[in-house]
Image: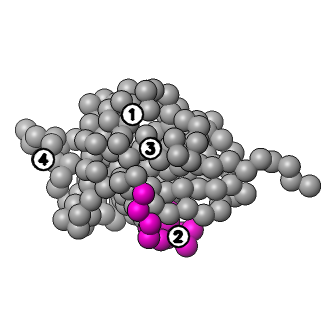
């Protein structure tokens, strides 16, 4: 008999709302959640706490997928109320977002850490009052030449980059599955096998 207690996990994908941002580098968190929802047969049909969200059973637990619609700099205003309303432990929350310091084609899961200047993560820190929660960093690489990073993250991925991204998003989905199924250490080990 399986006596394992059911746990609710909240997976937050960071991005900006609006069709014009769909393929922006900054929206890779939204892209990840769209892929995960599709694999689980879920649709983002509900709106609560300034977020599009969906939920369903997964691996004997409950999973909530949320895409804040506040624009990146204010995502904490969505994440804070969501986590409190559903009584999510910070250890069962993952924020997935773009990372300039990782090459495209890599992911890294960490249990805590700073924002490295990411405005979305800073907003979440302010609302949760802690930096101690898991985050899944998805590499988008550095801007070419002297391009302003703020302009770079709002550019669309190129066709070639989108093909590479399809592979890495699949690995990111597998990482989240491992996190829920086996815990953060197993998921971190998996994410660390993607080459830098």
In the displayed image of the protein, which residue is found farthest to the right? Answer: 1
- What is the spatial separation of the Cα atoms under label 3 and label 2, in whole angstroms? 22 Å
Answer with mark 1 or mark 4, whichever residue precedes in sequence.
Answer: 1
Q: Is residue 156 magenta?
A: no
Q: Nearer the viewer, residue 18 or 154?
A: 18
* Magenta residues (range): 36-48
Nearest the camera: 95 or 191? 95
Mark linked to residue 81: 3
Nearer the observer: mark 3 or 4; the answer is 3
- Left or right for 50, reference 175: left
**Are dots 1 and 4 in contact, CB under 8 Å?**
no
Circle on res. 183: none
Disc 4 on helix, strand or loop? Answer: helix
Left or right: 18, with 59 as reference point: left
**Residue ID for mark 1:** 127
Instruction: Give the quarter of the image for residue 73.
Output: top left
Would you name the residue on which mark 2 appears?
42
Rounded to the nearest angstrom, the CA distance separating label 4 from label 2 is 32 Å
Q: Are marks 3 and 2 in contact (CB under 8 Å)?
A: no
Determine which residue is flagged by label 4.
151
User: Could you tell me residue 69's position as x and y percent?
Assistant: 31, 55
Q: Is 39 within the magenta?
A: yes
Q: Answer yes or no: do the residues labelled 3 and 1 have beta carbons within 8 Å?
A: no
Residue at the spot 56% in from the left edge and 47% down from the top edge: 86
Q: CA distance from mark 3 to mark 4?
A: 30 Å
């Amino acid at each position: 008999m399986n006596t394992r207690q059911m746990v609710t996990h909240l997976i937050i994908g960071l991005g900006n709302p609006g069709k014009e941002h769909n393929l922006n580098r900054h929206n890779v968190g939204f892209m990840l959640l769209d892929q995960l929802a599709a694999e689980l047969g879920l649709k983002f049909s509900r709106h609560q706490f300034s977020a599009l969200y969906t939920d369903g059973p997964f691996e004997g637990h409950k999973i909530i997928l949320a895409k804040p619609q506040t624009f990146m700099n204010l995502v904490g205003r969505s994440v804070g109320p969501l986590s409190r309303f559903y009584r999510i432990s910070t250890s069962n929350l993952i924020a997935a977002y773009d990372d300039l310091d990782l090459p495209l084609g890599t992911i890294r899961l960490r249990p805590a850490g700073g924002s490295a200047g990411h405005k979305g993560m800073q907003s979440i820190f302010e609302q949760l009052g802690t930096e101690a929660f898991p985050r899944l960093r998805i590499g988008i690489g550095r801007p070419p030449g002297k391009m302003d990073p703020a302009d770079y993250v709002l550019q669309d991925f190129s066709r070639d980059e989108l093909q590479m991204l399809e592979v890495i998003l699949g690995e990111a989905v597998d990482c989240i599955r491992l996190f829920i199924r086996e815990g953060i250490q197993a998921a971190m080990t998996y994410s660390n096998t993607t080459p830098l």
